[in-house]
Image: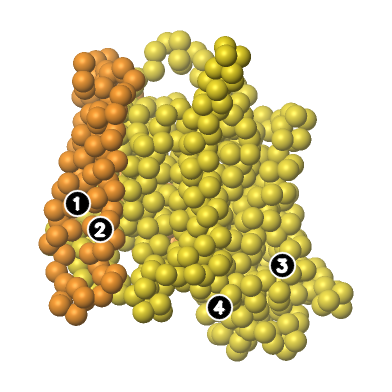
Amino acid sequence: MLEGILIGLGTALNPYNLVFVVVGCFVGTFIGMLPGLGPMSAIALMIPIAAGLDPAAGIILMAAVYYGAIFGGSTSSILINAPGVASTVATSFDGYPMAKQGKAGKALAIAAYSSFSGGVIGAILLLIAAPFLAQVSLAFHSTDYFALMVLGLTAVAAFAGQGNVLKAMLMTVVGLMLSTVGTDQTQGVQRFTLGMIDLLDGVSFLLLVMATFALSEALMAILKPKGDADRLKEKEASSNLGSMKIEKEEVKEMAPVIGRSSIMGFIIGVLPGAGATIASFLAYGTEQRLAGPEKGKLFGKGSVRGLSAPETANNAAATGSFVPLLTLGIPGSGTTAIMLGALIGYGIQPGPRLYLDQPAVFWSVIVSMWIGNIVLLVLNLPLIPYIAKILAIPSRFLLPLILFFSLIGVYFVSFNTFDIQLMIIFAVAAVALRLLDFPLAPMILGFILGGMMEDNLRRALLINDNSWSFLWERELTLTILAIAALTLFVPMLLPLYQRWRKNADRAGEGG
Amino acid sequence: MFFTKRRIGGLLLLAFCVTYGLLSQQIPLLPIQARSAFNAKTMPEVLSVLGIALSLAIVFLPAPGEYLELKGKAWGMTIAFLVLMSFYGLTIRPLGFVLSSSILLGVGYWILGERKWWLLLITSVPVATAFWALMSLGLGVFIEPLPWFLRG
């Protein structure tokens, strides 16, 4: 292994390849910041350039663009509540409130440090455990994936504070319902398309998230005009926008969160199909539960833990997704599928023999991840104070700009004007639900996981001869489902138990 | 009063779930598909039952007395923006990207109170043009920039 690392270091630190790491990180961050263009589009745009390079340099460039784009996506999530990709949705839950409090610089810095740590720890784990984890990922069947999606849905509990459990659960169901719109993939049947051709492919994630997060946020700001007192408060807060100062206490708070979320993110990233989105939601939900009642209440209101956990997890998962790609030749996500195509284009067949046949490619990709993460941090930290100043733009200019970027972010993907009208309908519904205090994040969670959950459940039933017995007969599935049930019901039942115990104690004292 | 924020939301979502449930009954299945344990209707049916049950619970369980406040909000301005966005969707093809986007931005700034014409112009047309150049010339994502009457 040491020999391999040295080969990797030699290749990745070659000045020629180093230039591609820097360029890739920069271009990736920039493209990732544009709403609508995520890591997949960024990598796809790099294919023609990478095709002209040697394999190691090409793959290094694409990997650098990948994690650059993931980091860039967090920036638009934090600043304007417009997560362009599913894996940065959870980042906006606490990142955006923090930015609204005038701490945009700090939020971006926390995101940068967390991404860096997640990426670096992920790369270390990749180095140590890649071949072993590849075997573990193969042991996961459809039934386990279904259970994993159910576990992902329990992250909904994080939004269920203050007696809102039912509301959060209902919104998750609404999200799951929206995920069923379009042509059913297995049976080819149209569902809820209302006879419209434009709905045959269903509702796109980007459209839904842009409408319910970015558009509705901008419309709410227009609907509730700010008073003089609010403006004064905002002006005071914006004077500190670019500050990246993180308190010592906050660093202490972040450290264990980063450790836990990196490991969790990496392991989930290794599983093909699970990926960075589930990792970020699960890390968010887990940290909310571990934070205790006092700090847990701060989640969704600009919590340091709430921002750090998903940011760390999604980067660690992005690194983890290279395990099945490099060791088994299985792409775990759309992004790694494009990279698989590029590798095959170079005449390289990823699989168990990759690190024997092409050690320079295998190890240089892993080593370039460390270097790439360092480059990302060095590139982005000095820019944060300037990027954060976007929020200092007067709202009469900023709000139309947010609307513009959200609309074209979706239009540039589909080139369908129907999508713009559909976005407006969703945005109106989202504004109504926000006015009625119904949480929108669980709906997005349900929407993201809905399709995958249905596919895996259907596959599991087909494999098991239409029998549901796999739910209790397969140990791994049962264990994951039991964890899901515990995470959902224990926080709900705990207050009831505490109340019952208090009453029992009081009765005991009285008697 | 019965109609708290929570109950209004519950009723709206109940209507949505009932409509979804009714539409789920119209999903066309072949006999062979209908016989399988899990078909295209299964998940929608389960979800509609869950959704209806949860919304009924929200409507009928005791709720905190928080009421919807409609006064003091800029409804006119918000509706103007919705119309403007819809207009953008209708005109982006015939008017081309640069002109339609400049209208969206310029009129948007104007609705929110900016009245200096030169400022409206320099903050809308260059933004739309620069973004078109970045996407089409820089990243190769082409979109027609010109209105229909100027196209060759």
For the colour orange, the matching chain is B
Query: Mark 2 is on which residue type?
Result: Pro
Task: Report, in whole angstroms, how far the alpha carbon at label 4 lies from the one at label 2.
Answer: 31 Å
In the structure shown, which secondary structural element does the residue marked by tag 3 occupy? helix
Q: Nearer the viewer, residue A213 or A410?
A: A213
> Seen in the image, is B28 located left or right of residue B97?
left
Residue carrying label 2: B44
Q: Give percent across and percent down for residue A340.
A: 55, 78
Q: Secondary structure at mark 2?
A: helix
Q: Secondary structure at mark 1?
A: helix
Picture coordinates of residue A442, whole percent (x, y)? 41, 44
Looking at the rendered structure, whether the residues under marks 1 and 4 are on a common chain is answered as no
Q: Quadrant of the N terminus of chain B?
A: top left
Q: Quadrant of residue A465 in the image?
A: bottom left
- Residue A9 to residue B97: above or below: below
Establish whether labels 3 and 4 are both on one chain. Answer: yes
A464 or B75, nearer to the observer: A464
Subunit that carries the residue with mark 2: B
Residue beneath the point at 36% across and 64% down: A454
Which amino acid type is shown beneath numbered disc 4?
Answer: Ile
* Residue A431 shows in the view: no
**Callout 2 environment at 10 Å: few (<14), some (14 to 19), or many (20+)?**
many
Residue at 30%, 24% (x, y): give it: B62
Label 1 Cα neighbours within 10 Å, binned few <14 / some 14-19 / many ≥20: many
Is any part of residue A437 visible from this angle? yes
- Identify the residue under disc 4: A330
The type of residue carrying mark 1 is Tyr
Depicted B101 relative to depicted B60: above or below: below
In this figure, which residue is indicated by the disc labeled 1?
A: B20
Q: Are marks 1 and 3 in contact (CB under 8 Å)?
A: no
List the residue tagged with mark 3. Answer: A126
